[in-house]
Amino acid sequence: MEAQIGTTRITSLELQALQTITHSDFYEQGRKSITWDFSVYDICTIAKRSRAGVYSSLVQKGFIVITEKERPYTLNENGEKIRNIYYERGGHNFGTIRITPEGYAALDKLKLIDEYGSFN
C-alpha cells in the first residue's frame, strides 16, 4: 500500500518502517515514545540493504528523527580526534528513533493509527 499526503508520497516500505517503530518494545508511551534503534531494527523485516534508505527517506520527509549511537571519539572544530564524554565503555551506546508530530499528522490524515499512535 502506498499513500499520498499533499505532494508527499509515502511508499509501502516507509509505511512498514513506521509501523515497525510502533511495534518496538519501547513504544510504551504511544505518541511520546522514543525507541532504541536496536529495538526497531531487530524486528524490521525490510532487507538490510534497503532499510537504511527507507529510514533515511523518512528522516528527509520529516516523519522521523534518528539519533546516532555514541562513538568513542568525535572530531572537534579543528578536525582533531577527542574522547566523547558521553560514550561508556561496555555501556549502552545505542541510537534512538522517534516519529515526529509531522509523521503522526500524516498517519492520522491517512487514518492508519489510533489516538495512542498504534497502527489499526
Image (spheres, rainbow, N blue to C red):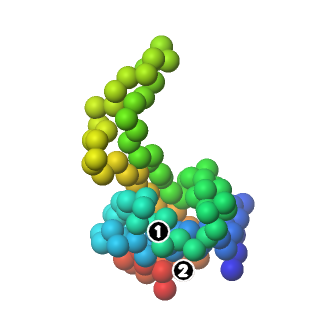
- The answer to whether residue 60 is above or below residue 110 is above
Quarter containing the N terminus: bottom right
Q: How many marks?
A: 2
Residue 19, percent from left and from top: 51, 74
Q: State the residue at coordinates (34%, 64%).
A: 33
3 sits to left or right of 23: right
Q: Which residue is mark 1?
A: 42
Nearer to us in this view, 103 or 88? 88
Give the labeled residue for mark 2.
111
Label 2 Cα neighbours within 10 Å, binned few <14 / some 14-19 / many ≥20: few
Residue 117 disc label: none
Specify the amino acid type for callout 2.
Answer: Lys
Where residue 39 appears, x then y in whole percent?
Answer: 40, 66
Residue 30 vs 35, above or below: the answer is: below
Measuring 40% from the left and 38% from the top, which residue is drawn there? 71
The one nearer the camera, 113 or 77, is 77
Task: Name the element at disc 1.
Answer: loop
Say left or right for 91 vs 68.
Answer: left
Q: Is residue 84 above or below residue 28?
A: above
**Distance Cα–Cα, label 2 vs label 1:** 27 Å
Farthest residue to the top: give it: 78
- Amino acid type at circle 1 is Asp
Classify 10 Å Cα crowding around label 1: few (below 14), some (14-19), many (20 and above): few
Q: Which marked residue is nearer to the observer: mark 2 or mark 1?
A: 1
Q: Is residue 51 visible?
A: yes
Label 2 with label 1: CB-CB less than 8 Å: no
Q: Tag 2's secondary structure? A: loop
The disc, 2 or 1, on the residue closer to the chain's N-terminal end is 1
Please identify the quarter of the rendering in which residue 28 is found: bottom left
Residue 117 on image: x %, y %: 41, 74
